[in-house]
Amino acid sequence: MSGEAQAPKTHSGFVALLGAPNSGKSTLVNQLVGTKVSIVTHKVQTTRSIIRGIATHHNAQIVFLDTPGIFKPRRALDRAMVTTAWGGAKDADMVLVLIDAERGIREDAEAILDNLKDVRQPKILVLNKIDRVKPDILLKLTAEANAKADFTRTFMISALTGSGCPDLLDHLAEALPEGPWYYPDDQVSDLPMRQLAAEITREKLYLRLHQELPYSSHVETEKWEERRDGSVRIEQVIYVERDSQKKIVLGHKGETIRAIGEAARKELVDILEQKVHLFLFVKVREWGSDPERYREMGLEFPH
């Protein structure tokens, strides 16, 4: 018999995060992955398509699906986001349901809990922002949520500080099925770099203008040129729906768009580890009913 030790079996799988807008899903994905893969802003519904963050933990590879926040849809873009979120849950191996413990179980969170009966995968309850809530309220929330849906486990965490997150990762690493990894062990997202760059600019846009700008604004990377001197030239277009919004994005004498561009450029330099020349343009484009525009954003066109 050979004296060689057997390599530990690997585990892998997809874990979808469901939650109301601003429950902390993007912050949690970034915390679990250990780096930024999903944009985080004060504005609700900033995650519009399913962004995959990849965490390698012990002998497991956990692929997180950060779905759009689930809310009551009012128009075509809203309906596309909600359809995409539920679709992501049904395609995953496990589902994490994130509830903002500070807000409690309000109408949006209650609607998610009520609809979980259609999701057959194992479901885990995650109470977020526990550092802001008294223990007795946390216990009451846990009991209320578990009475509404069939959860296999409950975790109490702070996505911002990371409290409770190692225990959650340990559990997921053990609970996911045995199987080979889907991605190289140093990969943290399957977003193409052009798309990640667009997401970063969109984050800076919302952080700067979250009161004045509707969330239907969209950023596309149109040109990506690696230059001989080792730098990269990136051209992006910010699409808004009306001329009045274009003026807001540009700002007085172009001050606003310059500030957005500089903030995005600095972050891109950190990520790419090379000099970045970033050029931003603003164009007006109505959403309308063109399915191709939804597909470009990874959303299902609502019928």
Image (tube, rainbow, N blue to C red):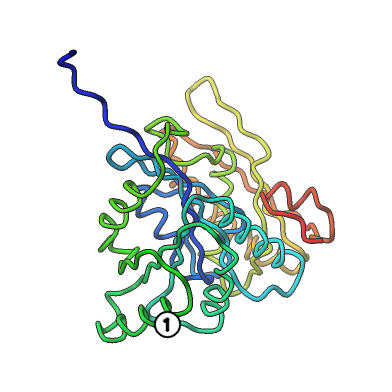
For the point 47% across and 42% down, which residue is it?
268
Q: Position of residue 121 (x, y in %)?
A: 50, 57
Left/right placement of residue 48 relative to residue 302 reads left
Q: Amino acid at mark 1?
A: Gly
Q: Can you see residue 192?
A: yes
Q: Who is closer to the viewer here, 95 or 273? A: 95
For the point 81% across and 52% down, which residue is it?
291
In the image, farthest residue toward the top: 1
Q: Position of residue 229 (x, y in %)?
A: 49, 22
For the point 56% across and 66% down, which residue is it?
69
Q: Is residue 224 above or below residue 213?
A: above
In the image, farthest residue toward the left: 3
For the point 41% across and 63% down, which residue is it?
124
Q: Who is closer to the viewer here, 83 or 78? A: 83
Asked which secondary structure carries label 1, the reply is loop
Q: Is residue 192 above or below residue 239?
A: above
Q: Is residue 54 above or below residue 152?
A: above
- Residue for badge 1: 104
